[in-house]
Structures are given as C-alpha cells and as structure tokens.
Amino acid sequence: MLLMTEKKTNPDMLMKKHLSDTVALALAGVTTSHGWTLKKAVQSGIDNPDSSIGVYAGDPESYTAFATLFDPIIKEYHRYDMSGHKSDFSLAGLPVENLDPEGRYVISTRVRVGRNFQKYAFPSAISAEDRAAMEAEIVEALKGLPGTLQGEYYPLDGMSEENRQKMIADHFLFKQGDRFLESAGVNRDWPKNRGIFFSLDKRFLVWVSEEDSMRIISMQPGADIAEVFTRLATALDFINQKVQFAFDPVRGYYTTCPTNLGTAMRASVHIRIPKFSASPDFEHTCKELGLSIRGIHGEHSESADGVYDISNKRRLGITEREIYSQLYQGVKKLIELEKSLE
Ligand code: ADP
Ligand code: CIR
C-alpha cells in the first residue's frame, strides 16, 4: 500500500482541483479576524505536492470566509450534502460484545475527537499569548472530572526527552507536527504551551495544542470498542459544560483540517491481520467498509508485522453512533477474513 512518506505529486489534490482562478481571485483579499488568508490556507498543499487535501483553516471564521474553496472540498472528502450535522452518542440497540475476547487480533482500541475553542484561533494561527491563556483554561476545565477520568496535566516544555520518546512510542503522546502541519503554522513556538493530560490508568487523555486545540482521547488494550466509546462520551458530557467549543450546525465541530470536521471523531483499532493485509483485496475491502488504513505510529507512518491502524474515514455526515457501528462491523469482517486465510 502507498503511505505518504515520499513527496510524489498528487494529481487529485482537492485544493488544486477546487482552487479555480475565479475562486482565487474572489478570495485574494480576504483576511479573517485572526489573520488567516488564502495564502496561509493553501500553503501546506503548495509545499507538499503529495497532499491529498492541501488546505488548513486558521480559525472558525475561515470556514465561512473561504467557503467557496472549503465547502467543495468538504463535500467531496466527506461525501456530504451540507444538509446539517447530527450528533448521536447513544449505543442503544447496537452490539457491544467484545469481538476478540482472546486478544488474537485486536491489540488496542482508541476513539478521539478534535475540539477547538470558539473564541481562539486554531493551533495553525493562534498567537503565543493566546496559546498560553488557552492552555491554562483547558487545565482548569479538566479539574473535577469524575471517577477514573481524573488525572494530571504534563506540559511538554520541561518534560525529559526520555519520557517524551517513551510516551510517543507507547502511542500516548503526539510528536511535533509533520511537514504538512509545519507548513500550516502548527509548529510555531514548539513545544511551548503544549502538553498532555492523562488519567492514572492512561485510558483517558487530552492532547493540548497539537493539530487541534484539544484532542480528547479514550484508549485501552484489547477490543472492547463499546467501553472505549462510552468513556469518551462520559468525558465529553463533562467537558462540554466547561468549554464553548467552535461548532457550526452544518459543518459540525470546527477543526484545523477539513477532514476532521463534523463529529471530529476517529475511532480506530490496531489490528494484527498479517494474511489478509498481504492480500490484494485489503485496500479495496477497507474502502468498501468505509475504513482508512494507517501505519501503527499514526498518520503517514508505516505498518509493522501485519499490524495496521484501521479507522472510520468519514467524520462529517455521519453520527458518532454510526462511526461506532462502522468500526465494529468493519473489525468483525476483517477478523473473519483473516480467519478464512489461516
Ligand atoms: P489522530 O489523528 O487520531 O490523533 P494519529 O494517526 O496521529 O492520529 O495517531 C496518534 C497516535 O495514536 C499514534 O501514536 C497512533 O499510533 C496512536 N493510535 C491510534 N490508534 C490507536 C489504537 N487503536 N491503539 C493504540 N494507539 C493508537
Ligand atoms: C494532506 O492534505 O494530505 C494533509 N494535509 C493531511 C490531510 C489529513 N489527513 C487525511 O486525509 N487522512
């Protein structure tokens, strides 16, 4: 499979496809209140010709100010008709049993959402001053989380290199942004005012000022997708009362990258399927199941030992409940296919 480690030109980059001369001309003089411009929005796609999307937003206002460029990209990527975002975290009536109780295939399960503040720019455009103020607000908002969600905040600045590398290798912590995010401005002032909050058992985590202002994460070893999903829903119920997130009734939760809009949810498993992943049907089958394939160290990383990160492709035009269902049914199918080849 092709993972984006080389700078091959992507002829299908959505930014190139939708940035006609007319659109470019109409948006040339536009600047949002946090200073986002067309040039900043498309810089990542220009610097990285292998981009699949090639645009980033700088603040909530970017999505309306540059709608003539962003909306066609959103519609095409998410196959979404802009008919309105619907949220539903309920699992009532859905299967919830563990699909791999013996732990033969599914190594771990993770569900995350991206969230940004209504009042601040996104990490791509935020000022150093606002980044510091936002960090303090997030730390405050996470105080008083109920039960096992309680935890501590650990700033990146000052963390030992050994500790940082170990947390990255163990899939808990984020790395500095890749070349796509670098071009979008996300790495400015690194690592100041970034950090990670986690519960004692490291099953509930919040990344602060990575690609989005917050990445709220539930994860654990094994295949109990329902438990992981429910933990996240409980945490969100609490945090929603403390922070006013940037939200739009049509585009859902606003995120730095348009691929994350809507639910901003990525529900994934690390699954060991050495036989089926080596078969020519692997990519096509995942696509049919609505699933994306990533390497095991995150986006744009490689796989190892037949273990892949499999997750929902769509985040907008789909509810959280539907994402759960899609991952659940997809994992079920992939395990069946692997078994049939053993
Ligand atoms: P995201 O956009 O979801 O934050 P990345 O692809 O950058 O994702 O991955 C972030 C980190 O989360 C990486 O270390 C990745 O390996 C880890 N990760 C993703 N899914 C899982 C999973 N199901 N189990 C364990 N770690 C995971
Ligand atoms: C790109 O355009 O390829 C990068 N900016 C990353 C896009 C986000 N990720 C994705 O589609 N899975």
Image: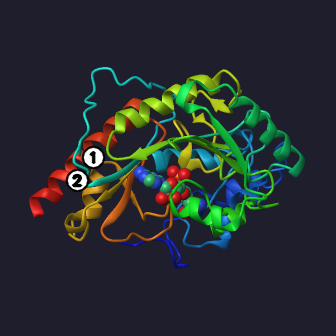
Q: Secondary structure at mark 2?
A: helix
Mark 1: amino acid: Gly
Image mark count? 2
Taking depth in this image into account, of 281 and 133 the one nearest to the observer is 133
Q: Residue at x 42, y 65 (%)?
A: 295
Looking at the rendering, the quadrant in which ligand 2 lies is bottom right
Taking depth in this image into account, of 62 and 150 the one nearest to the observer is 150
Label 2 packing within 10 angstroms: few (<14), some (14-19), many (20+): many
Q: Is residue 311 above or below residue 247?
A: below
Does the residue tagged 1 have its C-beta within 8 Å of any atom of ligand 1? no
Q: Residue at x 64, y 31 (%)?
A: 247
Q: Position of residue 67 (x, y in %)?
A: 66, 43
Q: Mark 1 near mark 2, Cβ–Cβ under 8 Å?
A: yes
Q: Position of residue 119 (x, y in %)?
A: 79, 33
Report the side of 262 relative to 246 (left or right).
Answer: left
Quadrant of the frame with the N terminus: bottom left
Taking depth in this image into account, of 13 and 89 the one nearest to the observer is 89
Q: How is the image coloured?
A: rainbow
Q: Position of residue 189 (x, y in %)?
A: 82, 60
Residue 334's disc number: 2
Q: Residue at x 37, y 71 (%)?
A: 304
Task: Note whether residue 275 is visible.
Answer: yes
Q: Residue at x 64, y 62 (%)?
A: 163
Mark 2: amino acid: Leu
The part of the image, by quadrant, that contains residue 184 is: bottom right
The part of the image, by quadrant, that contains residue 19 is: bottom right
Q: Position of residue 273 (x, y in %)?
A: 25, 62
Quadrant of the frame with the C terminus: bottom left
Q: Secondary structure at mark 1?
A: helix
User: Label 1: which residue?
Assistant: 330
